[in-house]
Image (spheres, grey):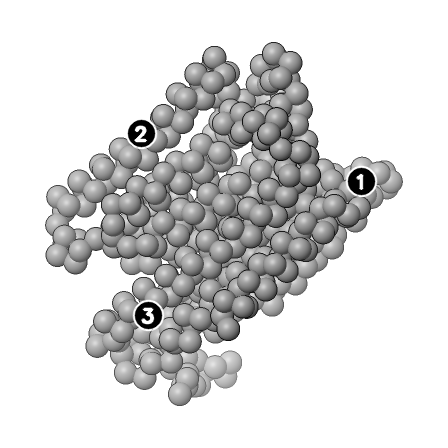
Amino acid sequence: MELAVLVGAAAAGFALRSGLIFSDLPKLVSQRVEFSVPTNSWQRVLEGSFLYDSGVDPYSGDIFHETPLCLVLFAVLKKRISCFGIDLIFPVLDVVTAFLLFFFARNLVQDTIVSEQKAKEKHASGTSKLLVPFADIVTVPRMVLLWYLFNPHIIGSCLEKTTSVFTNFLLAAMLLSASQGPSLLSRLSSLFFLALATYQTLYMFLLFPALHLYLLQNAPEKCRSSRKFHIARLVIHLGIFGGILAALVIGSSVIMGSWSFIRGVYGFAVFAPDLTPNIGLFWYFFTEMFEQFRTFFTWIFFLNICIYSVPVSIKLRHDPPFAIFTLLSLITIFKPYPSYGDVGFYLSLFPIWKRLYPHMRQSLVVVVMLLVAAVLFPILWKLWIEVGSANANFFYAITLVFVASQVFFVTDIMLAHEKREWHLMNGMKSDVDANGKAAELLLD
């Protein structure tokens, strides 16, 4: 029965994507700033490939910002398969990513149930309904699969054929590898996929502290109390991650015959010289910025993204997968060129933590703000760019609404996580109602 449901969902997701790709709908989302940004635009990949085939360095200008391996991969695919086959790669990869997330969710739910049952004696009385039920082993992975396959953000990103599809695949592979257990292969593969994701999208290196703690969580119980073991594992994991990333960068320099891609890929991601409007915070701020202050605020914005990595990982060290989820959302909020593909990926992971939903207080506000932003983005863009009856302030205003909705979501779910942990250890304490009287919080 479960296999039939999974196969049916996968077939429906693939049919929906492939059917839409070969329809006229991609023209409606073509070069939409919500989906396509300078760092994931398929049109720019095509232009960079043309320059590369013509013997021109694609990184010499300000058009191409993908990695050399992405460039070479597309060049090989273009020679081996037809345009029809290349178009099909995106829905196929999306379906594969959905299944990777499905198995990751199942592994994580199983591990969570086992750990909570072991720690049940430490929990306060009357908190049994806060624990993850055994039924979630079946329902949660299905929800993750469906949320990813039928998420409009993900579908639109696939139709636009953005390279976010590849990044999402690498992140899903990293998560699944990390959830496979304490084996050496699991550790190596998860670090390998994180290095590939970082190579493709620079800011993914911020996931390393949380991933390290996740891999450490799978270590034998007796080893985790040793400080030497922690230091040794950190050095090993950092060495493997850094070594793979260095090999990818050096290999890219050999392929290109120069180091020009460093500026075109990673320098571009940090300094964000392209101020094309998108759903992020950078473009409007730096459009209005005096040039003499640009360098200072560029580094401030970069540090703002990086500063959350270690504190969030330490705070959530007992739940590293949730730390990874939180960091993915923060990276999406604060990086220079976010897209709907990035937003859709971390939102698709939310069903894994559906146990936190009863503790969340801003759900309605977040949903309404996301819907309002989704409706008004294309309208205000048309009024500004095509009709000319509005200006950049209108579009940036709805961008702030969209970013604020994500901030509310992250803070709300983190607070809900802490509430649940506190209640598990201390019991269901009395809250104070609007009249100042004690009101028992009954769950049974």
Disc 2 target residue: 243
Q: Which amino acid does label 3 sit on?
A: Ile
Is 113 placed left or right of 155 in the picture? left
Foreground of the two, 131 or 416:
131
Q: Are marks 2 and 3 in contact (CB under 8 Å)?
A: no
The mark that comes first in sequence, 2 or 3, is: 3
Q: What element carries label 3?
A: helix
Viewer-side label of 1, 2: 2
Foreground of the two, 164 or 266:
164
Q: Where is residue 38 in the image (x, y as percent from the top left)?
A: 62, 32
Residue in view at x 49 percent, y 27 percent: 69
Viewer-side label of 1, 3: 3
Q: Quadrant of the rendered structure where residue 382 is?
A: top right
Q: Is residue 192 visible to the viewer in this orientation of the structure? A: yes
Q: In which quarter of the image is the C terminus?
A: bottom left
Disc 1 target residue: 384
Residue in view at x 53 percent, y 57 percent: 348
The mark that comes first in sequence, 1 or 3, is: 3
Q: Position of residue 124 (x, y in %)?
A: 27, 79
Q: Quadrant of the rendered structure where residue 55 is?
A: top right
Disc 3 target residue: 113
Q: Are marks 1 and 2 in contact (CB under 8 Å)?
A: no
Q: Position of residue 238 (x, y in %)?
A: 28, 36
Judge the density around disc 1: few (<14), some (14-19), many (≥20) Cα neighbours within 10 Å.
Answer: some
Marks 1 and 2, how far apart at CA? 47 Å
Position of 184 relative to 294 (above/below): below
Q: Position of residue 107 (x, y in %)?
A: 37, 61
Judge the density around disc 3: few (<14), some (14-19), many (≥20) Cα neighbours within 10 Å.
Answer: some
User: How many badges with numbers are in the image?
Assistant: 3
Residue in view at x 48 percent, y 21 percent: 262
Q: What residue type is labelled 1?
A: Trp
